[in-house]
Image: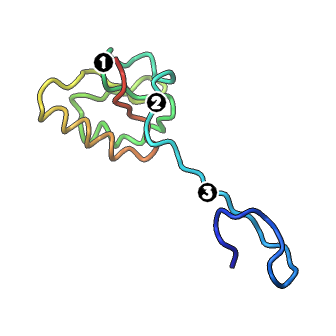
Amino acid sequence: MPSLGQGAGRAGSGKLVPSYRLTQPTLMATLTDRVPQNITGKYYVDSTCIDCDQCRAISPDFFGRTEDGMSFLKKQPATSDEVAQVEEAMTSCATASIGSDGE
């Protein structure tokens, strides 16, 4: 079996060895891709949202749904408990569509 991350080449047997390239997925939403319905602030949802409803189930006071099926942040958290709720939704997001580097 070839080693991961090595380029294609000849192994000792003279056969070509397949090359595998490991890529790291985006770990968080992109600020420049945030949906316009987000309220201004640190937290936001970007356009990679797939409308799975996870964030709205975890934090219904903070996340809403647009008519065309995107989640958005309708209220920024103010207390440490509220921040914890939004952060839980962010870490639970299957598509990493929730960001925390907003303004």
**Picture coordinates of residue 34 (x, y %)?**
46, 23
Residue 81 against residue 12 in the figure, above or below:
above
The N terminus - image quarter: bottom right
Front: mark 1 or 2: 1
The C terminus - image quarter: top left
Q: Residue at x 25, y 35 (%)?
A: 86
Closer to the N terminus: mark 2 or mark 3?
Answer: 3
Are circles 1 and 2 on residues that touch, CB within 8 Å?
no
Q: Residue at x 50, y 42 (%)?
A: 26
Q: Which residue is mark 3?
A: 22
Residue 36 against residue 8 in the figure, above or below:
above
Which amino acid type is marked by label 2? Answer: Gly
Front: mark 2 or 3: 3
Label 2 sits on a secondary structure element that is loop
Q: Quadrant of residue 28?
A: top left
Q: Viewed as shown, does residue 29 lie left or right of 91?
A: right
Front: mark 1 or 3: 3
Residue 61 against residue 19 in the figure, above or below:
above
**Picture coordinates of residue 70 (x, y %)?**
44, 29
Closer to the N terminus: mark 1 or mark 2?
Answer: 1
Q: Which mark is residue 69?
A: 2
Closer to the N terminus: mark 1 or mark 3?
Answer: 3
